[in-house]
Image (cartoon, grey):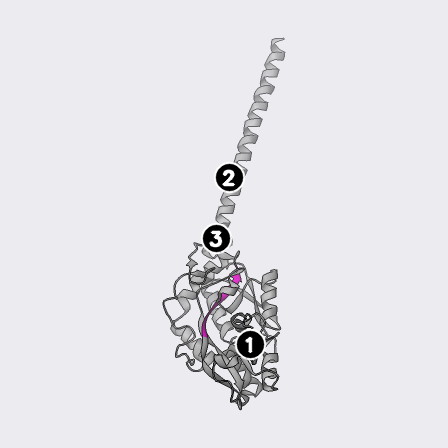
Amino acid sequence: MMTLLRKISTFWEIGLASSVAFALLVVVIQVAGVVLAFSSALAQAEGVNASGGKRGGVVAVVPRLWPPQYQVDADGKPFGFAIDVMNEIAFRANVSVKYRISESIPIAVDILRSGGADLIPNSGIVSERLDAFAFTAPVETFVISIFVRKDSEHIYDVEDLVGQNLAVVEKNVGLFMFEKRRDIKVRVFPDVRAALFELIAGHVDALVYPEPVLLALARQIGVEDRIKVVGAPLREIKRGIRAMKANVQLLSVLNKAVVDFVGTPAYQKISVKGFGRQRRSGRWPGSRGPWAHSCLYFWPPWRFGAFARSSG
C-alpha cells in the first residue's frame, strides 16, 4: 500500500510540475509576441524592418497628363515636377514608391479613395477635400485664374462672369469655387483637356483652372496663342501630398521629409527644372512661409495637428 501511495504522489508531483512548466511556456510565448509586435512597430516608425531594410513600398497614383506636375514618357514612366519632388521626399523618408497611372485627376482620386493607391504626390489643400483626406505640409503654391479666348473682349474679371458659360473641371478647385453660383452658367467637364477645347471652340466663354497647369498644357498641344489670362488670380492654393485620413502614420513620416526638403538648394533646382521661372504670384512654388511647419492638414484648413510617428 505504501508503495502504491508513493507512486501516486510521484505522478502527482510530475503532473504539477508539467502544469507549471506549461503555464510558464504560455507566458513566455505571450511575452515574446508582445516584444515582437513592439519591435516591428518601432522598426516601422524608425524606417526599417526586422532585417534592417527600407520601409514597405507605397503606391502613388498620378494622372497621365497634368503638366508641369505630371506627364508620362514613351515608356510609360511618369515624370514632372511632382514626380521629382515625390522621389526626393521618398528617398529622404526611406520609402520606396511605385507609380500607378490614371487617365485624369478625378480618376486618380477615385483610385485613392477605393484603396487602389496610398497617395497622390501633389494635390491642392482645400477645405472641400478635408472630410476624407489629409495632406502633408505644402510642397508648392500656385494660383487659380480665369482664362478666355485671345480675342475675347467682354470678360476682364470675375464680375464679368455673371450670365456667362463658365467651364470648370470635375473635382477641381474651380468647381468648388463656382458650383453654387446661380448667376453663372457653370459647366463641369471630366478633364481639363476637354474644357480647354470647349473654350477654344467657343462653346463656353471662360475657364477657371490652375494657371501654370493650363498654360503648360496649352503650350504642349500648341494652342497657347489662342487663350489668355484675365483679371487678378482668384485664389492661391497650397499643395501637398494627399492620402486618406486614416493613413496618418505614412503622412507623418512623409511630412518630416517634406519640411526638411522644401526650400533647400535641391528643391530649388527641381523648381527651376519644372517651371523655369517664377510664377506670376512672384513666389517660387515652394517658397517658405509661415505655413512651412511640421504639420498635417486636416479639417478645418486653418487648424492642423502634429502627430507622432506612433499615432494611427
Give yes or no for residue 136 being in the magenta stretch. Answer: no
Predominant secondary structure, magenta span? strand
Q: Residue at x 52, y 77 (%)?
A: 209
The front one of 136 and 41 is 136
Q: Which residues are magenta?
A: 235-244
Q: Which residue is mark 3?
A: 43
Q: Quadrant of the N terminus?
A: top right
The answer for how far apart the CA atoms under marks 3 and 2 are is 18 Å
**In the displayed structure image, the side of residue 72 where residue 306 appears, left or right:** left
The front one of 2 and 151 is 151
The answer to whether the residue labelled 1 contacts the one labelled 2, judged by CB atoms less than 8 Å apart, is: no
Q: In terms of secondary structure, where does tag 2 sit?
A: helix
The label number, if any, that marks residue 184 in the structure image: 1
Q: Which residue is mark 2?
A: 31
Q: In terms of secondary structure, where does tag 1 sit?
A: loop
- Residue type highlighted by circle 1: Ile
Q: Residue at x 56, y 74 (%)?
A: 78
Q: Residues within 10 Å of mark 2 (few under 14, many from 20)?
A: few
Ranked by sequence position, the earlier of labels 3 and 1 is 3
The answer for how far apart the CA atoms under marks 3 and 1 are is 55 Å
Ranked by sequence position, the earlier of labels 3 and 2 is 2
The front one of 203 and 220 is 203
The front one of 14 and 302 is 302
Q: Quadrant of residue 8?
A: top right
